[in-house]
Image (tube, grey):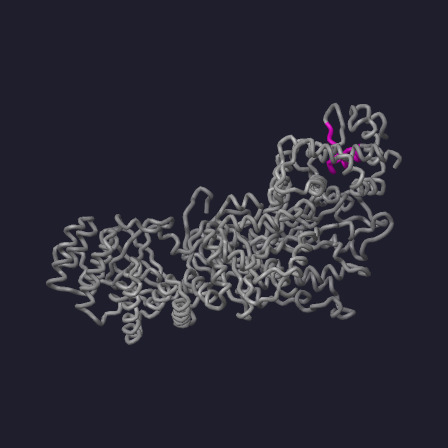
């Protein structure tokens, strides 16, 4: 499919895992994609709150990627029927030419047109009651992204292609030609001379389409008098009555329709859903219980086709259950509705008396920007009065699980509680003060506050109280997604190496952002359909002597990923694993078991199987190793036995297969620069493409500081940002640490930082926070003593000197030293000058020039 050829395709969701956010859609027969299943991710959805289910009918665009096609802008087929303009709707006549009801769709040949209109089973006037091929119908049609689409499909007797024969057909032809007054006269004549169910339904539908609902109701009532035992007439009349606010009348008609449809054993689902919807809209405690009853009855009738249960009704059913389970559920839902937030997910806990979970969509962009929060956030509404540690752990777990797929962020969650006792408040404050960033900030919403809410004012007061106490600058964990700033060039370089099946090494100073870059590229790989495994080699247990633990860990991670993502594929189900998934614990592996050979068997079989899956894009395996120095024997110590064979194996596998790529990260490039280790040839000498991680550009650094500060109630003037960038050179860690120190010194909120405030604390910061600069110098002294001496000389010269002068002071073999320093972004140089990039580092070196 060429990139220029943009066309929406139809398909059926073959599999989707809501927890991981991955899925595959099987396109309808299409010359360009054949029967290949197409990968999509939660990020590919048009409405990112949608809960995709196996069997759902969708429209999507096929986007070209290096290994095939990927589905984007995925949305339910029914979403592509725009809300009609009732004054301009038209009905047309046709015949059902084909229907594949097991897949939920069909086609109608429209009389007088050269094209068939697609329809979904939900678009039938009696949903889920399939009409046979050859049935004559009238319907409304809309031009959608994919072509002509039919909905509100009504079976119709007496429809004929020629005009002038029969009052109904004459009325239809007049209506199709938009001669509505003439059509109405013919319909009225038909009601008097030859009334039929089809004529009444067709006439009433036309009047509804013209916005004449009171006249449509009159037509339905006349039809009911003529045909009192017809369920469809009463169902449509009931829906119309409810839509104009006559709930009692609508319910009475629908209850009659339910009795009639039950007798005929046909059309019950649609009536039950209509009843449930009306009772839910009324919203009293009594009617909500009835809504739950009718939703559940309809759900049971779907049987094995429960995946076709409309999502709107599924969400309403869960909300009705929560609202009737506990009054705090009702209060919570009302609070978020008053804020105009959308609830896109809702469910009771397994222990229904304990509470419920929501995912809310904060539609107020001003709130999102003011507090630096995501638009989708988790809410736990606790029905019980006492909050325990296990409840907080559950919030952490649920937040982590849903954040993995990208549905919500893992930084903030809400908990609706009866009250906030001092003990709970202390625990929640300690979580905020904990700077490791491993747990979300849990913002308590006490019942008394949201019950007496003043709307957005109350919500802002709560956010001010809790979020402005955070220190977003001080986080020590890797950042991904919304909190990953800049690095566009480095991400593009990594993406290019993976697309070209080239292995790469990411190198740079500690805390420059290497781990964050690897985690972000992993997230993007996963959203693009690849299989990626990230291993921090510092995670290797103490006492591990060889690489067997790594083989075991890699194989288990690969096994867990592919068996989850490709669970519907027999080739994956039947895959024989020799190591992955066989041993839950490393110590379960028998003593003489050949771990390396078992891993080789697992990896080779997996690569072949993935390449043969009928999917697009073709999944690639990408292995990411952080802190690669842990593997190597550097400085006469460390390393793992078998590391030469381990590295050589992956070099050989990468060269044999275009389905696997290895990315490593470390503080220095020894893994690719050293030709030997302990007298043994380095199998990956000059093998990895070297990518030195640069400092942030000025605009990237400013964006990072502004975004993080906003979430703390701190705003930075331009001159303050200019000063911070000069001091830190755009080093993300030092910029954040410096701003964290600023926030500690100036605690009022909201706060505006100006240049003088930055200058006032700079010397104090250098005195108190120099340990991180010491770490840079220690590493240079150990690994690159010449480079360390250059930095000291530059500091003594005021931070810069003519490059020619520096060359005179250095030995002839110093070219690599300059390359290292520029690669690490410690210095910058042009044809005339070389200078230290961070003014803070320059000042610290001057105070410690004796090192």
- Residue 842 horizontal/vertical position (percent): 79, 32
- Residue 625 horizontal/vertical position (percent): 71, 52
At x 65%, y 30%, the residue is 719
Describe residue 129's horizontal placement relative to residue 820 as left or right: left
Viewer-proximal residue, 80 or 533? 80
- Magenta-drawn stretch contains 650: no
- On the question of residue 92 being in view, the answer is no
- The residue segment tinted magenta is 815-829
Viewer-proximal residue, 577 or 845? 845
Viewer-proximal residue, 403 or 827? 403
- Residue 767 horizontal/vertical position (percent): 80, 38
Image quarter hosting the C terminus: top right
- Residue 288 horizontal/vertical position (percent): 41, 67
Above or below — where is 234 with respect to 89? below
Quarter of image, res 789: top right
Describe residue 135's horizontal placement relative to residue 693 as left or right: left
Quarter of image, res 742: top right
Above or below — where is 726 with respect to 653? above
Describe residue 674's horizontal placement relative to residue 349 as left or right: right
The overriding secondary structure of the stretch rendered in magenta is helix
């Amino acid at each position: 499919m060429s990139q220029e050829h943009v066309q929406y395709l139809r398909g059926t969701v073959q599999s989707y895992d809501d927890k991981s956010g991955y899925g595959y859609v099987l396109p309808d027969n299409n010359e360009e994609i054949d029967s290949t299943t197409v990968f999509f991710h939660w990020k590919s959805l048009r409405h990112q709150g949608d809960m995709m289910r196996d069997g759902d009918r969708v429209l999507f665009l096929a986007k070209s990627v290096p290994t095939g096609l990927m589905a984007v802008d995925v949305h339910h087929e029914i979403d592509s029927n725009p809300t009609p303009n009732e004054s301009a709707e038209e009905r047309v006549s046709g015949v059902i030419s084909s229907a594949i009801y097991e897949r939920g769709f069909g086609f109608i040949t429209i009389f007088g047109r050269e094209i068939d209109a697609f329809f979904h089973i939900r678009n039938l006037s009696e949903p889920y009651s399939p009409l046979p091929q050859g049935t004559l119908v009238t319907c409304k049609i809309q031009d959608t992204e994919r072509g002509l689409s039919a909905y509100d499909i009504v079976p119709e007797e007496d429809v004929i292609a020629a005009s002038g024969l029969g009052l109904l057909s004459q009325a239809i032809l007049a209506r199709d030609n938009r001669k509505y007054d003439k059509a109405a006269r013919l319909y009225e004549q038909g009601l008097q001379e030859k009334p039929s169910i089809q004529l009444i339904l067709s006439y009433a539908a036309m009047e509804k389409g013209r916005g004449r609902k009171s006249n449509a109701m009159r037509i339905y009532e006349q039809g009911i008098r003529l045909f009192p035992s017809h369920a469809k007439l009463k169902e449509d009349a009931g829906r119309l009555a409810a839509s104009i606010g006559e709930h009692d009348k609508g319910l009475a008609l629908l209850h009659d329709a339910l009795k009639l449809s039950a007798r005929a054993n046909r059309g019950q689902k649609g009536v039950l859903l209509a009843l449930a919807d009306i009772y839910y809209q009324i919203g009293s405690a009594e009617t909500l219980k009835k809504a739950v009853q009718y939703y559940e009855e309809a759900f049971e009738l779907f049987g094995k086709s429960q995946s076709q249960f409309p999502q709107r009704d599924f969400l309403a059913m869960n909300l009705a259950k929560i609202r009737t389970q506990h009054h705090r559920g009702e209060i919570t839902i009302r609070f978020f509705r008053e804020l105009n937030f959308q609830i896109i997910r809702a469910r009771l806990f397994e222990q229904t008396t304990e509470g419920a979970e929501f995912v809310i969509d904060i539609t107020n962009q001003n709130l999102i920007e003011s507090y630096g929060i995501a638009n989708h956030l988790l809410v736990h509404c606790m029905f019980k009065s006492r909050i325990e540690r296990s409840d907080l752990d559950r919030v952490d777990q649920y937040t982590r699980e849903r954040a993995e797929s990208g549905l919500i962020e893992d930084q903030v969650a809400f908990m609706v509680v009866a009250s906030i006792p001092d003990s709970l408040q202390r625990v929640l404050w300690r979580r905020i003060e904990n700077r490791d960033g491993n747990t979300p900030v849990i913002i308590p919403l006490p019942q008394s506050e949201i019950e007496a809410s003043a709307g957005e004012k109350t919500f802002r007061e709560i956010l001010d109280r809790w979020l402005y106490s955070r220190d977003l600058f001080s986080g020590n964990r890797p950042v991904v997604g919304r909190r990953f700033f800049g690095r566009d060039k480095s991400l593009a370089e990594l993406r290019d190496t993976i697309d070209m099946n080239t292995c790469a090494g990411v190198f740079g100073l500690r805390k420059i952002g290497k781990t964050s870059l690897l985690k972000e590229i992993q997230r993007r790989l996963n959203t693009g359909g690849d299989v990626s495994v990230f291993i921090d080699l510092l995670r290797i247990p103490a006492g591990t002597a060889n690489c067997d633990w790594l083989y075991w860990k890699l194989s288990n991670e690969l096994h867990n990923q592919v068996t989850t993502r490709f669970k519907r594929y027999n080739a994956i189900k039947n895959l024989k694993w020799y190591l992955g998934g066989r041993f839950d614990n490393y110590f379960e592996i028998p003593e003489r078991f050949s771990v390396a050979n078992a891993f080789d068997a697992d990896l080779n079989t997996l690569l072949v199987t993935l390449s043969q899956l009928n999917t697009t894009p073709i999944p690639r395996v990408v292995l990411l190793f952080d802190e690669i120095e842990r593997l190597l024997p550097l400085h006469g110590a460390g390393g793992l036995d078998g590391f030469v064979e381990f590295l050589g194996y992956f070099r050989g596998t990468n060269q044999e297969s275009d389905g696997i790529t290895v990315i490593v990260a470390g503080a220095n490039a020894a893994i690719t620069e050293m030709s030997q280790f302990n007298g043994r040839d380095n199998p990956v000498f000059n093998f990895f493409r070297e990518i030195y991680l640069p400092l942030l550009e000025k605009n990237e650094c400013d964006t990072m500081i502004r975004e993080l500060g906003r979430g703390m109630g701190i705003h930075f003037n331009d001159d303050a940002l200019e000063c911070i960038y000069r001091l830190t050179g755009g080093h993300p860690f030092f910029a954040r640490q410096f701003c964290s120190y600023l926030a500690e010194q100036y605690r009022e909120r909201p706060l505006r930082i100006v240049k003088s405030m930055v200058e006032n604390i700079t010397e104090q910061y250098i005195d108190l926070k120099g340990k991180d600069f010491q770490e840079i110098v220690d590493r240079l002294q150990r690994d690159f003593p010449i480079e360390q001496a250059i930095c000291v000389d530059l500091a003594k010269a005021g931070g810069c000197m003519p490059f020619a002068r520096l060359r005179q002071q250095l030995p002839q073999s110093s070219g690599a030293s300059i390359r290292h320093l520029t690669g690490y972004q410690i210095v910058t140089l042009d044809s005339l000058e070389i200078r230290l990039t961070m003014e803070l580092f320059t000042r610290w070196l001057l105070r410690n020039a004796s090192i």
